[in-house]
Image (cartoon, rainbow, N blue to C red):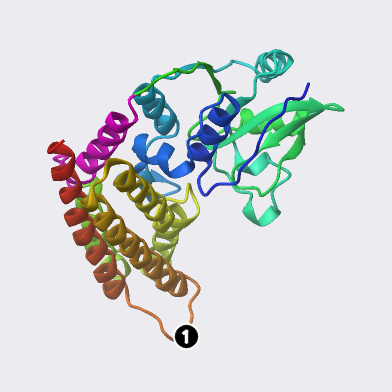
């Protein structure tokens, strides 16, 4: 049960899986184009939604939305399934592999034994592709890996049915129909409009760049309001969500900036190119914020920022992104 499958490494699992799956079906879309058309960039701070007592922060859309939006905008028909038991999920997977169909699926990072131990933690929204089976082991294209790998039946079943939020429930998906022709320019503008709208125009203080500003203001006062120990735990979670869970902070800015660069060339629009350069700088600022926040969490003795200074850094990013995405919205509205 093997097929001729081309694997390419990517920065983000969902957009990388989409790109690799579509390449198998004869459609060449790189990761930035998938991510941009699928409107993957987002931000929300949820102080009232807590896991282990820590407020929720997300730098991305809900898992699966990038593929859903991209497919709708390009005109790709996707089949999706979830299952009640591991046995049913693995049987369905084997049937698709027998047909020569690579399958994307949702897994828990913790049970993917081919990953180094340091990278395995309880995160249940990691996308991979299974494209074959040899000697009882499943062949895996994991976008974060340089090369393809393999995994046992037992470990893959556990990864597909891990407990916790969100529960993977054996979810798997694959294209069943791809269009011969599609309106790429329209799809690009639709993706830009939705991302810029969600980052600047949703009338809630916890969402988009306003949500980042809200977090920055709250973060400044965590030590006196929560105590040093809890403040460091909360700050560490912000950085974990920003830089580890789904590449959401600087990494997403760099991917989206690459998308805007490509879009500017295709659409012959210099404004998109200028905004891509500004967003790259915003990504650099977020990486600096993560670096200094990490030093605070690790209790370094030199070059350490205060929580107030970290709040200032994050607020500066929020103001700049409000300006960037407002300008993007205006550009998309003019089309």
Q: Is residue 292 above or below residue 73?
A: below
Quarter holding the N terminus? top right
Q: Residue furthest bottom?
A: 302
Query: From where the camera sits, is residue 157 visible?
Result: no
Does the magenta run of residues contain 268? no
Q: Residue beneath label 1, please?
A: 301
Q: As drawn, is 87 to the left or to the right of 225?
A: right
Residue 196 falls inside the magenta stretch: yes
| Residue for point 21% across, 52% down | 271
Q: Main secondary structure of the magenta part?
A: helix
In this rendered view, identify the residue nearer to me: 94 or 242: 94
Residue 63 location (% of width, % of height) = 44, 34
Query: In the figure, is residue 98 to the left or right of 237?
Result: right
Give the quarter of the figure containing the C terminus: top left
Q: Residue at x 76, y 37 (%)?
A: 150
Alpha-carbon neighbours of circle 1 within 10 Å: few (<14), some, or many (≥20)? few
* In the image: residue 236, left or right of residue 107: left
Q: Secondary structure at mark 1?
A: loop
Q: Position of residue 87 (x, y in %)?
A: 70, 16
Q: Which quadrant of the figure has residue 302? A: bottom left
Q: Identify the residue shown where x is 60% and y is 35%.
A: 128
Q: Where is residue 121 drawn, in percent x and y?
A: 60, 48
Percent across and percent down for residue 104 are: 58, 28
Magenta span of residues: 183-205
Task: Name which quarter of the figure residue 202 lies in.
Answer: top left
| Location of residue 130 by image quarter | top right
Near-viewer residue (235 or 52): 235
Q: In this rendered view, identify the residue nearer to me: 203 or 2.
A: 2
For residue 186, above or below residue 81 = below
Asked whether the viewer can see residue 155, the reply is: yes
């Amino acid at each position: 049960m093997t097929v001729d499958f081309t694997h390419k490494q990517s920065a983000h699992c969902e957009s990388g899986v989409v790109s690799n799956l579509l390449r198998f079906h004869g459609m060449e879309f790189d990761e930035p184009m998938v991510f941009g058309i699928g409107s993957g960039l987002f931000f929300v701070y949820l102080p009232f939604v807590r896991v282990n007592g820590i407020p929720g922060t997300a730098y991305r859309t809900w898992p699966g939305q990038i593929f859903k939006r991209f497919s709708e905008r390009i005109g790709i028909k996707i089949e999706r399934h979830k299952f009640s038991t591991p046995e049913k999920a693995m049987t369905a997977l084997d049937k698709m592999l027998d047909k020569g169909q690579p399958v994307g699926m949702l897994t828990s990072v913790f049970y993917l034994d081919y990953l180094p131990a340091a990278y395995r933690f309880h995160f249940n929204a990691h996308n991979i592709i299974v494209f074959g089976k040899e000697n009882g082991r499943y062949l895996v294209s994991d976008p974060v890996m340089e090369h393809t790998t393999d995994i046992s039946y037992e470990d893959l079943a556990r990864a597909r049915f891990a407990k916790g939020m969100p529960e993977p429930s054996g979810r798997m998906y694959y294209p069943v129909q791809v269009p011969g022709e599609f309106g790429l320019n329209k799809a690009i503008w639709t993706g830009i409009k939705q991302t810029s709208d969600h980052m600047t125009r949703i009338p809630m203080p916890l969402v988009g760049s306003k949500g980042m500003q809200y977090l920055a203001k709250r973060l400044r006062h965590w030590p006196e309001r929560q105590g040093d120990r809890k403040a460091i735990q909360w700050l560490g979670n912000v950085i974990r969500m920003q830089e580890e869970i789904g590449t959401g902070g600087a990494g997403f800015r760099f991917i989206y900036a690459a998308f805007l660069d490509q879009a500017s060339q295709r659409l012959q629009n210099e404004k998109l190119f200028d905004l891509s350069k500004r967003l790259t700088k915003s990504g650099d600022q977020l990486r600096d914020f993560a670096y200094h926040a990490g030093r605070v969490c690790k209790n370094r003795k030199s070059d350490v920022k205060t929580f107030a200074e970290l709040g200032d850094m994050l607020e500066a990013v929020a103001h700049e992104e409000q300006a960037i995405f407002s300008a993007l919205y205006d550009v998309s509205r003019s089309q």
